[in-house]
Amino acid sequence: MPEKQPTSLVTGGAGFLGSHLCDRLIAEGNKVICMDNLLTGSMENIAHLMGNENFQFIKYNVTDYVYVEGQLDYILHFASPASPIDYLKLPIQTLKVGSLGTHKTLGLAKEKNARFLLASTSEVYGDPQIHPQPENYWGNVNPIGVRGVYDEAKRFAEAMVMAYHRYHNLDTRIVRIFNTYGPRMRLHDGRALPTFMKQALQDENLTVFGDGSQTRSFCYVDDLVEGIYRLLMSDEIHPVNIGNPEEISLLQFAEEIIKITGTTSKIKFEPLPQDDPKIRQPDITKAKNVLGWEPQVKRRDGLMRTLKYFQEQLKN
């Protein structure tokens, strides 16, 4: 007798990461329900899936009571504003989707007896005093700073997921996502990579904050989705870092973008935003050992694919 087709709910499924996850889950044979209120997501990201018999889109705000008909096997909670510009503009919504949204989707997972995966973030480590950041590091977060709305929403969400796991015996997973890039990123989302690429493609000077010595570690989206899928299918209930440990300063990164775009743009320096992390690099020892995962896509290859996408976007 053939096995029943699994059904997955992806909240925030019309966003950058959520839409790539919808693609992967469908490719793995899942029926996918994508739920998004389109606050920061876009129908463009899932347009290619509309009409697919294994895909359904529901426009909905997951901070309200969530009801889905029929059996659910997996719930992946990715709904949240996720860039500094978003959470400065939408602080209350960011807090609500991390708290109420996580509560509502956990309740749904309990009702459906579904496995639940939370999209957490490297921002739970704040401006870290340990480098690189392992999962057992508790972080250095300013709870009342402007970035606190995102950092603390995710920290609260992790605490709630573990409470549901311990108290209700819910089957849960937590992924801590580090800087990710690739097609379907929004050009105007305020993160370093889309900002640099947009500025370079429009022959504007590239904005680097501070002296540019702060570091980031950029992971290509296909690698990230592979790591998340492996975590979803694993037995690991504690948080796992998924990201690329290859660290680069933002000044070097800006210079790299200037080189690959062939622009004549220069670099301009602006004051550092409040609580901007000085360093960011995942310790992925756990992902390697538990999931057999590490990134495969070289940064230059990933950047060339992303550049092509942004060039298309700017034409439209």
Image (cartoon, rainbow, N blue to C red):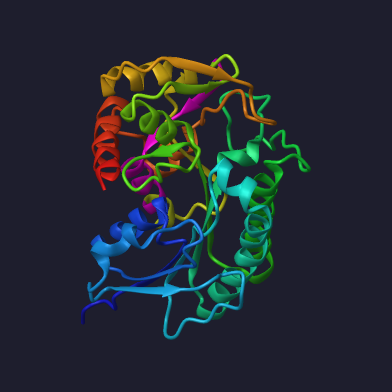
Q: Is residue 205 left or right of residue 270?
A: left
Nearest the eye: 38 or 270:
270
Q: How many numbered marks have been drawn onto this rendered protein structure?
A: 0
From this viewpoint, is residue 29 visible? no
Q: Which residue is drawn at the image coordinates 71% and 43% (left, top)?
A: 148
The quarter in which the N terminus is drawn is bottom left
Q: Position of residue 242 (x, y in %)?
A: 46, 40
Front-lying residue, 259 or 12: 259
Query: From which residue to which does the magenta span run?
Result: 213-229
Residue found at x 37% / y 33%: 198
212 up-or-down from 171: above or below: above
Point 54% across, 73% down: residue? 109
Q: Where on the picture, by quarter, is residue 210?
A: top right
| Residue 221 is one of the magenta-drawn residues | yes
- Front residue of this view, candidates 58 and 21: 58
Is residue 143 highlighted in magenta? no
**Quarter assignment of residue 88:** top right
Q: Is residue 252 above or below residue 316?
A: above
Estimate the x, y position of residue 262 in percent, counting from the top left: 26, 19
